[in-house]
Amino acid sequence: MERNRRGRVARETLETNIVVELNLDGDGSSQVSTGIGFLDHMLTLFAKHAGLTLLVQAKGDTWIDDHHTVEDVGIALGQTLKQAFGDKIGLQRYGHAYVPMDETLVRTALDISGRPFLVYEVEGLPEKVGQFDCQLIEEFWRAVSFNAGLTVHVDKLRGKNAHHILEAVFKSYAQALRDAARITGTSLPSTKGKIE
């Protein structure tokens, strides 16, 4: 049975105007334009490693700072993922990934649980990568996880270079999500009879 595992969210506030579209069964391609170069780079590699097709168009009040845009893109991405998961019938549900990048090693474990939670243990980063505020990545993943209904643990096991660490975070999250979102059965992966 062919399933339509797609989502689309258009979100407009006084601070941001965002459209996110994705196909869980995509080809890793993306069109990303947020006005924040580092976020565009991270979302592009996220789509590639998650194996989904992703469109992100965002305009925000980046003349203030990047916070509103980064968090709101995370909210919209999470809502879009939740749509694409659909009834969750047949999902693998759990996924994990270790991603090495030079001196860095990051692990992400993920459950499409319906119970939002994020443990983000990525310590020792400098304040900035280029002009980008490193603190915003935790806010981004919190927004994604809570709006998609995911339980997620992200751990930096080792690493020194901030760009390597954050890139490994995005890649490991993407690969854990790809694993968890695979269709591997024909029933709901829960003994409760529901995932919410």
Image (cartoon, rainbow, N blue to C red):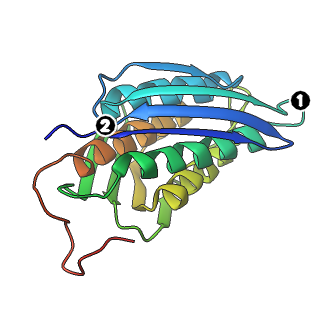
Q: Can you tell which quarter of the image residue 162 is in?
A: top right
Q: Can you tell which quarter of the image residue 10 is in?
A: top right
Rendered-image quadrant of the C terminus:
bottom left
Task: Name the amino acid type tagged 2.
Answer: Pro
Q: Residue furthest front?
A: 1
Residue at 28%, 58% in the rendered image: 88
Compare residues 44 and 85 and report the one nearer the observer. 85
Residue 102 seen: yes
Rendered-image quadrant of the N terminus:
top left
Label 2, residues with CA under 10 Å away: few <14, some 14-19, many ≥20: many
The residue under label 1 is 63
144 is higher (above) or lower (below) than 178: below
Image coordinates of residue 37 in percent, x first then y, are 65, 21
- The answer to whether 74 appears left or right of 152 in the picture is right
Residue 105 seen: no
The residue under label 2 is 100
Give the CA distance from mark 2 to mark 1: 35 Å
Residue at 29%, 22% in the rendered image: 27
183 is higher (above) or lower (below) than 43: below
Q: Are marks 2 and 1 in contact (CB under 8 Å)?
A: no
Residue at 25%, 59% in the rendered image: 93
Q: Secondary structure at mark 1?
A: loop
